């Protein structure tokens, strides 16, 4: 049998090899190049860049948060604007309804104004029509001016019937007849120099023009030292218009 190896002898045999390994490691450490001086600023720049990048990210996050808050505010404002817009639309719809009603009323008023304008024109024509009707209703009448009061006696109609042919020297066929005859106005006091006119209405319209035509041509008639004027019977308005032309008669 071989004898067992001695541990101490084995350890001692390994010491030279361990020492050689230690010297080689120390030599490599001494020969290893030290860090270059330029790498330190690069590392500092990297550190500053990292710090700056971190600050920038914080700012970006803060800005994003602020934008989010602003967006929420804008959303609230948009909601308020939407409600205001709806309210304005409702108001506009109400105004449109009122405007439509006003337009209808204005149209009605304009139509009524047009009708009123037509009525105004008719009303302006009414006075002249009434005056014309008055004159037409009096075309069978004749007026006598200059007969003294009470010269006609109690029967004015018979007096005019007998006197007119004598004044005009005209003959009438059929015989002259009147519907009525009387003095105009209330009885005047005694001593007045202006007797009331006598008015008579012909029974036949065809007998009215001839005496008036002769009166226009001859002028006043004479009877018992009296001047008698015979004129047609006109309305007050027509008489006033005729008086305006009296000054022009001598020049015609």
Image (cartoon, rainbow, N blue to C red):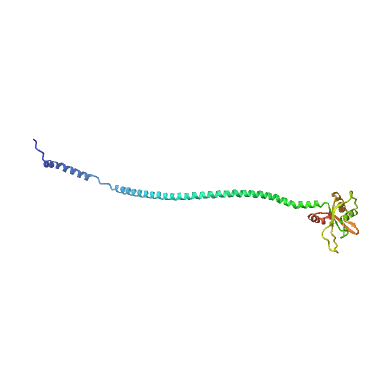
Between 51 and 232, the one lying in front of the other is: 232
Q: Quadrant of the N terminus?
A: top left
In the rendered image, the vertical position of residue 192 relative to residue 251, given as above or below:
below
Residue under the point 49% across and 49% down: 83
Q: Is residue 154 left or right of residue 101?
A: right
Between 134 and 23, the one lying in front of the other is: 134
Residue under the point 74% across and 51% down: 126
Question: Which x, y percent locates residue 49?
Answer: 34, 48
Question: Which x, y percent locates residue 90?
Answer: 53, 49
In the rendered image, the vertical position of residue 103 relative to residue 224, given as above or below:
above
* Furthest residue toward front: 154
* Furthest residue toward top: 1
Residue 200 location, quadrant: bottom right
| Res 250 visible | no
Query: Total number of numbered labels?
Result: 0
| Res 79 visible | yes
Question: Which x, y percent locates residue 65?
Answer: 40, 49
Question: Which x, y percent locates residue 53?
Answer: 35, 48
* Furthest residue toward bottom: 191
Residue under the point 62% across and 48% down: 104
Between 23 and 225, the one lying in front of the other is: 225
């Amino acid at each position: 049998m071989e004898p067992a190896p001695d541990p101490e002898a084995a350890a001692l045999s390994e010491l030279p090899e361990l020492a050689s390994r230690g010297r080689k490691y120390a030599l490599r450490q001494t020969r290893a190049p030290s860090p270059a001086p330029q790498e330190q600023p690069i590392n500092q720049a990297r550190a500053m860049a990292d710090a700056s990048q971190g600050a920038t990210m914080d700012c970006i996050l803060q800005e994003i948060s602020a934008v989010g808050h602003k967006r929420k505010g804008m959303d609230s404002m948009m909601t308020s604007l939407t409600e205001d817009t709806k309210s304005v639309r409702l108001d506009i719809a109400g105004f449109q309804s009122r405007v439509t009603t006003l337009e209808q009323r204005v149209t009605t008023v304009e139509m009524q104004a047009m009708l009123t304008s037509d009525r105004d024109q008719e009303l302006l024509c009414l006075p002249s029509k009434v005056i014309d009707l008055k004159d037409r209703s009096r075309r069978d009448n004749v007026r006598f001016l200059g007969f003294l009061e009470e010269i006609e006696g109690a029967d004015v109609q018979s007096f005019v019937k007998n006197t007119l042919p004598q004044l005009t020297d005209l003959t009438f066929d059929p015989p002259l007849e009147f519907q009525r005859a009387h003095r105009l106005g209330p009885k005047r006091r005694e001593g007045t120099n202006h007797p009331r006119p006598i008015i008579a209405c012909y029974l036949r319209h065809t007998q009215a023009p001839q005496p008036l035509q002769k009166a226009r041509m001859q002028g006043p008639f004479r009877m018992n030292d009296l001047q008698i004027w015979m004129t047609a019977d006109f309305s007050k308005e027509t008489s006033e218009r005729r008086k305006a032309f009296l000054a022009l008669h001598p020049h015609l």
